[in-house]
Image: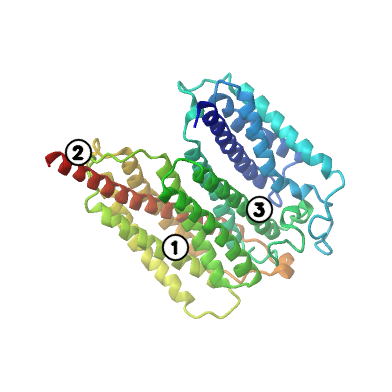
Amino acid sequence: MNANTNQTANIIRAALTLGFLSSVLMWCAWFLTHLPGHHAPPAVTGVLLLVVMAAVLGQAGRATPRRPWLLGLLAGLTCGLVNLLLLGSLLVEQPTSTENLSPGTSGIRPDAIILVPGFLLLCSALGAIAGAAGSRLPRPGRDDLQRDWVAAFAWVAVIATIPVLLIGGIVTSADAGLAVPDWPGSYGANMFLYPLALMADPRIFLEHTHRLFGSLIGLTTLVLCILTLFSRRTMPIKGWAVGLLVLVIVQGVMGGLGRVVGQNPYFGALHGVTAQVFFALVVAFAAVLASKKADPNQPPLGKAGPMTAIWLGCVLLQLVLGAMYRHLSASDQELAGVGHILMSHIGFSFVVLVLAVVTGSMLRGRRGESESIPKARIRVGKSMIHVVGLQFILGWAAFFVSRNRGTPPTADELSAEQVPLVETLVTMAHQLNGAFVLALATLAFGMWIVSRRAARRGERVIRSEVS
């Protein structure tokens, strides 16, 4: 690959990374400013979105001293294309009820043919301006365009997954999973063309935006897979990327067909578990892409290695128990054993907590060994203790605020049911933090595997030198 081709490929990767990152952050800002009951004025929302976009795309100027406006323009165009998934809610006629919604694309406004190109042109122009302005900011000593943009995009995928988990937890906690009765459409309309005016009901807003954010992470994973396949990565890494794409597709279909259409609480529990497993695998994938080759001379994990495997298994079991209780207890069916699942989840939380403290302390090592232990291992060990401690506290808080939880209302019962705010926030925080616990457990286990391989590689080198 010649220098010009490599430069072009890096520009494309950088534009995709910055464009998707700005879109993810803009979607988060849009979600916060459109919450029912706290809807911000359009002017405030517009200014906030532009500030977020300019702040991210301005990094294009710091990435390269050569034609930073071009990188900003391409990143802005990417951002605009992704944001069309949200803009669709404004490109259709705004009815007053969900009855007789226009199917497919028949409800699009006549001026959409002008609004869409204008929107893309605006995003491209703002990106070019932000890139040119960013070139005046302090720049790193190296040409940052030569960085590993595939690894950087993997971290964008991690960031994009967090709001999906957050909103998914709110949907479950607010009993909004059945607020939109059909899938993949929304009340018969195209999912991406569901009118913004009909999202006033809190549960409809939560369920519908959860679907939109799910499509965003699906698109992000698809691009990550393509970038990885066309990079100079090993076959196991490429296979991992393909596996992530397959998993996110299965996750979406399972949530739509199993939980929404089939109204099966078991699919709901599996949907929740799979989402957190996906998050852990994406975090591990990004960490592997960003990590350097392990030093065979670093202190081995020793007994801490098997402990990471045991703790990961316990976290997975605890996660399954929690998801089963959350979804089965909210079912309108008489399901035996739900109370037993809760008691098992509570009792096993003490096991997970003790194992986290023991394993985390072993990863941190003794005081005299701290200088020789990799900083990443120490940070993971400390984080394990703190995050699991927080999870233990949130678990008890969730238990006390959700003891009288009822069944989720159907689409016909939304107006008669109020969203329990405190219960929603506490249980959502417990579920989201559980995803971070699983991600840390996966990272710790991955460190053990990498250290074992590095040690074996060092042993082979020593044998070859002796022979």
Q: Give the label on residue 371, or none.
A: none
Q: Residue at x 40, y 44 (%)?
A: 288
Q: Amino acid at mark 1?
A: Leu
Which residue bears the numbered disc 2?
A: 368
> Which badge, 1 or 3, comes first in the chain's sequence?
3
Q: Amino acid at mark 2?
A: Gly
Q: Residue at x 51, y 26 (%)?
A: 3
Label 2, secondary structure: give it. Answer: helix
Per the model, the C-alpha gap separating discs 3 and 2 is: 50 Å
Per the model, the C-alpha gap separating discs 1 and 2 is: 36 Å
Which residue bears the numbered disc 1?
A: 319
Q: Amino acid at mark 3?
A: Leu
How many C-alpha atoms fall within 10 Å of the one at disc 2: few (<14), some, or many (≥20)? few
> Which badge, 1 or 2, comes first in the chain's sequence?
1
Spot the residue most to the left.
Answer: 466
Examine the rendered structure and indicate whether residue 381 appears above or below residue 313. Answer: above
Which residue bears the numbered disc 3?
A: 212
**Mark 3–mark 2 contact, CB under 8 Å?**
no
Q: Position of residue 78 (x, y in %)?
A: 65, 38
> Which badge, 3 or 2, comes first in the chain's sequence?
3
Q: Position of residue 378 (x, y in %)?
A: 31, 42
Label 3, secondary structure: give it. Answer: helix
Decide if residue 341 is in sight here.
yes
